[in-house]
Image (cartoon, grey):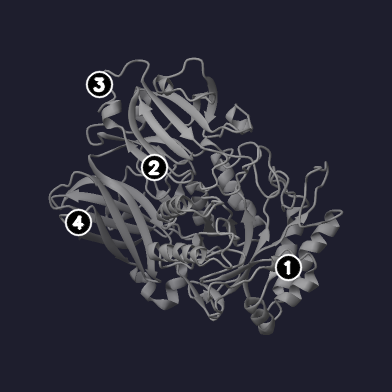
Amino acid sequence: MSTLDGTVAAPDLPLASRQDGEYPRPQLLRGAWADLDGTWSFRNTGDDPAWRNGFPDAREITVPFPPESAASGIDEPGFHPVVWYARTIGREELTAAGLGADRDRLLLHFGAVDHRARVWIDGQFIGEHEGGHTPFVLDVTEALGSTPDDGTPDGGHLLVVRAEDDPHDVTQPRGKQDWHEHPHAIWYRRTTGIWQTVWLEAVPSRSVAALRWTNVDHATVRLTVRLRGERRTDERVRVEAWWEEQGERIARVETSVPATADEVDVTVPVTRQTNGQAADELTWSPETPRLVDATVTLLQDGVTPVDAVASYFGVRTVGLDGGAFLLNGRAYDVRSVLNQGYWPESHLAAPSRAALRREVELIKELGFTAARNHQKIEDPRFLYWADRLGLLVWGEAPGAYAFSPLAVQRLVREWMDAVERDASHPSIVTWVPANESWGVQQIATDPAQQAYARALADVTRALDATRPVVSNDGWEHPDSDIVTIHDYEGDGSRLAATYADDAARTALLGGRGPADRRILVGGAVDRGQPVMLTEFGGVDYQPGAQREDGWGYTSAVDGDDWIARITALYDGVRASSFLAGSCWTQLTDTLQETNGLLNADRTPKVPIERIRRAITGA
């Protein structure tokens, strides 16, 4: 690691901005962690509480792949309302987690367990969590012992997880997971239970629990540091930031932790950015994805290091002005693709960690500058590669299908956790808490549902005032920073006419749009917001073997016809005088939806250069 003014910055920490994609929490790194993915015991028959003590007649499953998927080794795509997992944790895992005299607390992390998880160690109940797409952590120090040499039995400690996921409960945030046994229409096979990495980490008794980077402006970043454990005397937080690519120090700041608080805000001035002529040298964008590395050190008595973690941030701003989407103060055409984040062999779980990087690379190779992660809170390692390789991302909540007090509580809680988890990623530029009136089917006329959608948008703004919020992607917006429209018109000239000029814009926003839905509802008015076409295209083309149930919104007869249709639709978008961005449906074929630019195995349907030319016009 590079030196700064003659001192070495946390030499035992990895470089956060240059990871290999393995670390499950990309923006808060320590030097050691134990990966608990791999072979576990598994049961999905019955719900016997005695199984918390183990089940010798169980089958084997490969975590983190859901039991519905082939990658799991179970490959049973039917309903799994309750599933059980078990594995042992022994001295090897405790040592790999970094357990020692200066790191004597053990934390058990779950990336995501759908939908409700309960956890035991050696039959002792440890904790539970509800929310199938967000992480949770449990302190398991007392259950696992304080050191690797404390007499742990050779067989290790038994970790048991029970996951409950009612396939017919429409108050759960489900996204695209089908409530029918077999996929139909636009819904896919389910992802039950553990579907993101399980891992073990040792930390000091007083430690950094979470970091939140916020771009205040083009030359100022704010870091919120959250702490856990018993407070020490005269605590201070030191932040050192540098641009590794140039070996240049960016900032070094220290601040005191309030004596009665477990949270402190640190203002990190990026003083080199005050030179406006040089500001673009450091800013983050898809074209220049520059990241700033940082170490955050917790000090006791003002001088003694207690904990240190590595992180990174990007210097960039997002805004809206005069109907344009702004990136770093300049109008930016958002050329996006709908990304379902679904793989045929592993469903919502990526088949490998390398696959997350490849997904970002493919999106960029196709000519897109952005991805709309659709109805899924994606693995943080996807966002890391979006940060590192340069891809704008729209973060979207998986929808529930019911409107009820329970559905509202569940989605708001899970969405708040998702925003908090992902807000530090420079790649995320827009939040989408609702899509196509899912869960608010009567929003056009029901004041209660309109209030809920407005509240979702407002709570998102309250959590993060630096990014625009789309209140209900597609149509029926009660309050939206960007007006987004879904339109599957298959004729390029008709599409061009719908989005031609200001007169067309006024007619569209003032009346009924595609799918015979009003664009603005609940008293919302046209405030001159940017307008984006956030779903269009969806052209079915199946080279080779044909799926009998395969479909798209229109169909092509061969590769040449398919490219011609894509080109014509993009020509229609490019002809618009007011569209600030677009999102093509979709990146890959997904089960019965055969309207992807890529096959389900991520191979292009025609040479990728031809697809790119159709999309970019160049």
**Residue highlighted by disc 1:** 570
Residue at 48 percent across and 27 percent down: it is: 84
Badge 4 crowding class, 10 Å Cα cut-off, few under 14, some 14 to 19, many 20 or more, is: many
**Residue highlighted by disc 3:** 150
User: Marks 2 and 4: CB-CB under 8 Å?
Assistant: no
**Residue highlighted by disc 2:** 136
Instruction: Please say if 441 is above or below 491.
Output: above
Of marks 2 and 4, the one in the foreground: 2
Q: Earlier in the sequence, mark 2 or mark 3?
A: 2
Label 1, label 4: how far apart the Cα atoms are:
53 Å
What type is the residue that disc 3 sits on?
Answer: Asp
Badge 1 crowding class, 10 Å Cα cut-off, few under 14, some 14 to 19, many 20 or more, is: many
Label 1, label 3: how far apart the Cα atoms are:
65 Å
Answer with left or right where residue 25 lies relative to residue 332.
Answer: left
Give SS at disc 4: loop
Label 2, label 3: how far apart the Cα atoms are:
27 Å
Q: Earlier in the sequence, mark 2 or mark 4?
A: 2
Give SS at disc 3: loop
Badge 2 crowding class, 10 Å Cα cut-off, few under 14, some 14 to 19, many 20 or more, is: some
**Residue highlighted by disc 4:** 257
Measured from the top left, where is residue 294 in percent x and y? 35, 55
